[in-house]
């Protein structure tokens, strides 16, 4: 039997860790977001990202990918304008 | 509910099994981000390995190799030799990633050898102050009075009786051209340090302070706050040496006592139960005060 010793790059993305979230889920207020990108820097999953879309103030806002978000809340913690709130998730 | 889907732009993909709020994985992604895709990484055994590469998957998008707990520095030396043989020396960044267990204890002989030979790699140590992956046993990096599964507090002890090993001084004793500490609470500084280190030829050492959610007994959303408090209290100075000279220290802009830093962590909970705990906190405060004095961390 042959067992391959290598793995294809980035293949862990097939595991959707969104089901790790227990109670709280990040909710981004697009109007408050100033697009600084600090959430992207500190997100342990690396799934806070710039949407490329702009709010009424012309700022590009960020969002989170709930397929992977484990609900740690660090994005909400570091956000300098409190645009991210951790809210109870309606499933 | 957000319907947005990330384009997964980073060199470390999600889907890894690091805990919610993990400090190590933040550091890992930032280091890769700063190093760029033209990088090869050798990884020691530890959380940074087991959480990212659950067979047959990998979270890494760069060439990455794991062999043993002790030998990533030797592995990197071999990869560099192979690149040299192919005439591709200096074209690719070589990273070594390891936790404090692999760095301070198990791999220290291999690291010392590679540093002495002057191997051209950046060694990144994720310092979470114990063997968190195997169940929170104390390591050479565990600070005084921390509760780990091998240093439990009780009638005759108040947690770890030993001081943290000064790996920065050990690195400096090898005359490395670049030695620094970083902190996940300061991601921009961390990225700048990795980029700077990679412009320098020779062995480099970067030690990143990474809180461990289950090991330290903190909430997932407290990772950055606790890491920040380590800097603000002087417990973990953010410093940078080039060619043995202290070239940069992060001054404390909001000074706090070590008590504030210790309080949210369950690994120090026993220090707040009785009078003898106060004596121990004073000892830790003394260590922090000495850091502040020695590195000139005070703003004034």
Image (spheres, helix red, strand yellow):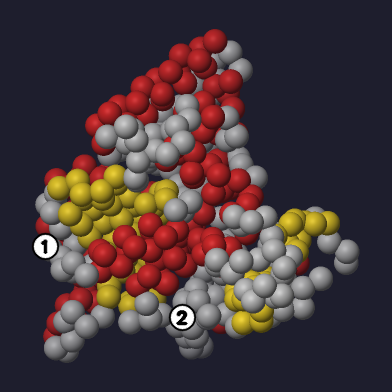
- Give the number of the disc on residue B93: none
Q: Is residue B145 above or below residue B215?
A: above
* Mark toward the start of the polypeptide (1 vs 2): 2
Residue lying at 48% horizontally and 51% vertically, measured from the top left: B185
Q: What secondary structure is found at the residue carrying circle 1?
A: helix
Extreme residue in the front direction: A57
- Of residues A46 and B196, the one nearer the viewer is B196
In the picture provided, is B86 more to the left or to the right than B284?
left
Residue B117 in the image: state x and y as whole percent.
11, 62
Give the spatial CA distance, label 1 vs label 2: 29 Å
Chain under label 2?
B
- Of residues B106 and B241, the one nearer the viewer is B241
**Which-is-in-front pick, marks 1 and 2?**
2
Q: Which residue is mark 2?
A: B61
Q: Which residue is mark 1?
A: B117
Residue B74 in the image: state x and y as whole percent.
24, 65
Is residue B230 visible from the viewing direction of this image?
A: yes
Residue lying at 88% horizontally and 67% vertically, measured from the top left: A91
In the picture provided, is B31 more to the left or to the right than B83?
right
Q: Is residue B20 above or below residue B286?
A: below
């Amino acid at each position: 039997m042959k067992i391959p010793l290598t793995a294809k790059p980035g293949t862990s993305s097939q595991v959707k860790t969104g089901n790790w979230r227990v109670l709280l889920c990040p909710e981004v207020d697009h109007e408050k977001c100033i697009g600084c990108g600090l959430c992207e820097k500190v997100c342990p999953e690396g799934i806070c990202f710039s949407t490329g879309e702009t709010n009424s103030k012309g700022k590009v806002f960020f969002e989170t990918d709930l397929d992977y978000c484990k609900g740690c809340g660090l994005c909400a913690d570091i956000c300098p304008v409190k645009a991210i709130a951790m809210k109870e998730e309606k499933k | 509910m957000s319907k947005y889907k990330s384009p997964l732009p980073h060199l470390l993909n999600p889907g890894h099994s690091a805990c919610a709020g993990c400090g190590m994985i933040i550091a890992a992604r930032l280091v890769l981000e700063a190093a760029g895709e033209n990088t090869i990484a050798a990884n020691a055994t530890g959380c940074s390995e087991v959480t990212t590469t659950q067979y047959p998957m990998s979270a890494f998008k760069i060439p990455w190799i794991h062999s043993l707990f002790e030998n990533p520095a030797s592995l990197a030396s071999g990869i560099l030799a192979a690149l040299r043989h192919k005439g591709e020396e200096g074209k690719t960044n070589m990273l070594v990633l390891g936790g404090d267990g692999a760095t301070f204890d198990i791999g220290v002989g291999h690291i010392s050898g590679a540093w002495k030979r002057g191997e051209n790699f950046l060694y990144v140590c994720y310092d979470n102050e114990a063997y968190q992956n195997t169940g929170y046993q104390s390591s050479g990096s565990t600070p005084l009075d921390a509760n780990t599964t091998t240093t439990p507090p009780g009638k005759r002890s108040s947690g770890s009786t030993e001081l943290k090993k000064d790996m920065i001084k050990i690195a400096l004793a090898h005359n490395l051209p670049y030695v620094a500490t970083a902190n996940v609470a300061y991601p921009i500084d961390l990225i700048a340090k990795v980029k700077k280190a990679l412009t320098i030829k020779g062995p480099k050492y970067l030690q990143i302070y990474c809180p461990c959610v289950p090991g330290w007994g903190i909430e997932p959303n407290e990772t950055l706050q606790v890491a920040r408090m380590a800097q603000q209290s002087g417990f973990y100075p953010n410093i940078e040496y080039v060619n043995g000279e202290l070239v940069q220290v992060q001054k404390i802009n909001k000074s706090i006592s070590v008590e504030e830093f210790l309080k949210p962590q369950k690994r120090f909970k026993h220090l707040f139960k009785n009078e003898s705990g106060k004596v121990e906190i004073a000892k830790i405060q003394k260590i922090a005060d000495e850091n502040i004095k020695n590195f000139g961390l005070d703003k004034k």
